[in-house]
Amino acid sequence: MKLDYSRLDPELATALEQMPLSFSGITADNIGIIREAMAAMRPPAVETDVVVERRSVPAADGDVDVYIYHRNPTQPQPGLLWIHGGGYIVGTAEDDRARIIAENLDCIVVSVDYRLAPEHPFPAGPEDCYAALLWMVEHAGDLHVDATRLAIGGASAGAGMAAGLALMNRDRGGSELALQLLMYPMIDNLHDTPSGQYTNHPVWDQGTSFSAWEMYLGGTPGVDASPYAAASRAEDLSGLPPAYICVGTEDLFRDEDIEYARRLIDAGIPCELAVFPGMYHGGDMFVPQARISRRLNANFLSALSHGLGLS
């Protein structure tokens, strides 16, 4: 099936004509070229009062780098473990949204430079993120983090990894989490939903997504995929932290995200769901000045602030 582009928000639709990079046709053979192109397109650093520190965190298979975003706090602040997006195969922990969160809220943001597929398929990425979460708790004092107010979150694949991390943390008896912030999460390796049947979604289409899942999972395990990789495969959602989920109406992930929110609510988990009309995948980052993008950003920042007890 083909998506009707007339349903896109006009401000977001116009920007599609100027997109400098396409993810369509991405494979293990050309992933290096895509990463190089993305690195070359990174905008210069924004002048801000947010300080960024890079540190190495011990993990099971060697150290993993994290980037700490803060504004030189003198008192303990809530902490957010941030997981960048990129389909589990591209992206960097030097993430603009991590900076934006630290700039707008009084919290410490730790962004994880987890290992990427296909070189490092599941479970490498989630294990790196779990190690970073344990490190945040262990070093809360040094980081000026209030360990009683911790959240995890991400966007796209980062949100999918955060959803899996919430399940992993629950099952391993980890620290209590105040919130899982899931921005248009990539959580269903099957895309067996109405929105998942369209083949031409902007930015991140069905073919691209299936290719990314295959690289991340080291094949196509289907319904047998680990819920720590694809949270939609989880049978039991009880005992998870409160959740915030947002997605656009024109996103490949729309229906899997709405269904996950419904299942969380059915399991007794407080969950806020926000669905933004005309928004395609990542549209808020590609066109941040669009009115619908500003609404999305204000909404998720408000939800995070509330979840961390800042408002």
Image (cartoon, rainbow, N blue to C red):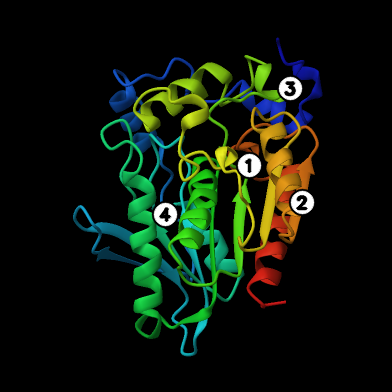
Tell me if I can see residue 287 in this picture. Answer: yes
Q: Which residue type carries mark 1?
A: Tyr
1 vs 4, front mark? 1
Residue 138 place in picture, x, y as percent: 35, 78
Label 4 or label 3, whichever comes before in sequence order? 4
Position of the C terminus by quadrant: bottom right
Q: Which mark is residue 266?
A: 2
2 vs 3, front mark? 2
Residue ranking furthest to the bottom? 75
Q: Residue at x 40, y 80 (%)?
A: 140
Residue ranking furthest to the top? 1
Q: Which residue type carries mark 3?
A: Pro
Per the model, the C-alpha gap separating discs 2 and 3 is 21 Å
Q: Which residue type carries mark 4?
A: Ala
Position of the N terminus by quadrant: top right
Per the model, the C-alpha gap separating discs 2 and 4 is 43 Å
Q: Which mark is residue 184?
A: 1
Q: Which residue is labeled 4 in the image?
A: 45
Label 2 or label 3, whichever comes before in sequence order? 3
- Vertically, is 54 above or below 310? above
Q: Residue at x 38, y 56 (%)?
A: 129
Residue 68 place in picture, x, y as percent: 39, 67
Q: Which mark is residue 311?
A: none
